[in-house]
Image (cartoon, grey):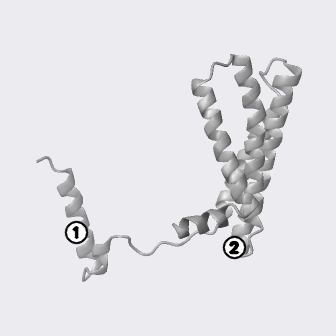
Amino acid sequence: MTRAINFGRSWLGEWGGWLTTGHGLLMIWFVMWLLFGAASAEQKTLVTDILQPLFCLGAVSFAFRASRQKSLDDRTRRAWKILSVAFSVYFIATVIWFYYEIIVGGELGLTWADPFYFACYPIVLAGLLTFPMVRSGRSRFPSCRTCPGPDRCRRRISRSRASCLRPR
């Protein structure tokens, strides 16, 4: 019980824990409201367009917070910075979409939000590819460590695959 109390204190003792808890509760409320609420389509559009930038802004703050962690190496922090830029671009796109859909109320075939939405994905890909990767070993099969040679190991693996594919 003491561990749970200490975990709660450490979790809610900083702004990241509070923001995570708030976003989680807001998401639960939003999904329940969408599923079971008796709101009109216009009300659902309005609430969705208001909440979407809030969730994007939370993603920006979390990624920026991760990029400022001193315990991470430089490459990981750089990857989180790139992701925070990507989430910022997505946030700008959602704000522009809110403007066109709610304030202007015009036709939404093609808007200025679209280039920002499209620009987000290559930046996210660049951020994900920037994270350091761990090289895998020569083989992941546990039997390969005990085999006397690689040829026997390959035969053993092919036999096991063949036995799995044989009808019984």
Place of residue 24 in the rendered image (x, y in percent of width and height, measured from the top left):
64, 46
Image quadrant assignment for residue 152? bottom left
**In the figure, 2 relative to 164: above or below?**
below
Residue 72 numbered mark, or none: 2
- At horizontal 78% and vertical 39% (from top left) the residue drawn is 53
Place of residue 29 in the rendered image (x, y in percent of width and height, measured from the top left):
64, 36
Answer yes or no: is residue 81 visible. no
- Residues under numbered marks 1 and 2 in contact, where contact means CB atoms less than 8 Å apart: no
Answer yes or no: is residue 128 visible. yes
| First-in-chain label (1 vs 2) | 2
- At horizontal 31% and vertical 73% (from top left) the residue drawn is 142
Image quadrant assignment for residue 74? bottom right
Image quadrant assignment for residue 25? top right
- At horizontal 25% and vertical 79% (from top left) the residue drawn is 147
Q: Indicate left or right for 24 with 53 as reference.
A: left
Secondary element type, mark 1 = helix
- At horizontal 75% and vertical 44% (from top left) the residue drawn is 56
Place of residue 14 in the rendered image (x, y in percent of width and height, measured from the top left):
74, 63
Place of residue 115 in the rendered image (x, y in percent of width and height, measured from the top left):
80, 37
Residue positioned most to the right? 104
Residue positioned most to the bottom? 148
Secondary element type, mark 2 = loop
**In the figure, 166 relative to 37: above or below?**
below
The residue carrying pointer 2 sits among few (fewer than 14), some (14 to 19) or many (20 or more) residues within 10 Å by Cα, namely: few
Of 17 and 146, nearer the camera is 17
Q: Which residue is mark 1?
A: 155
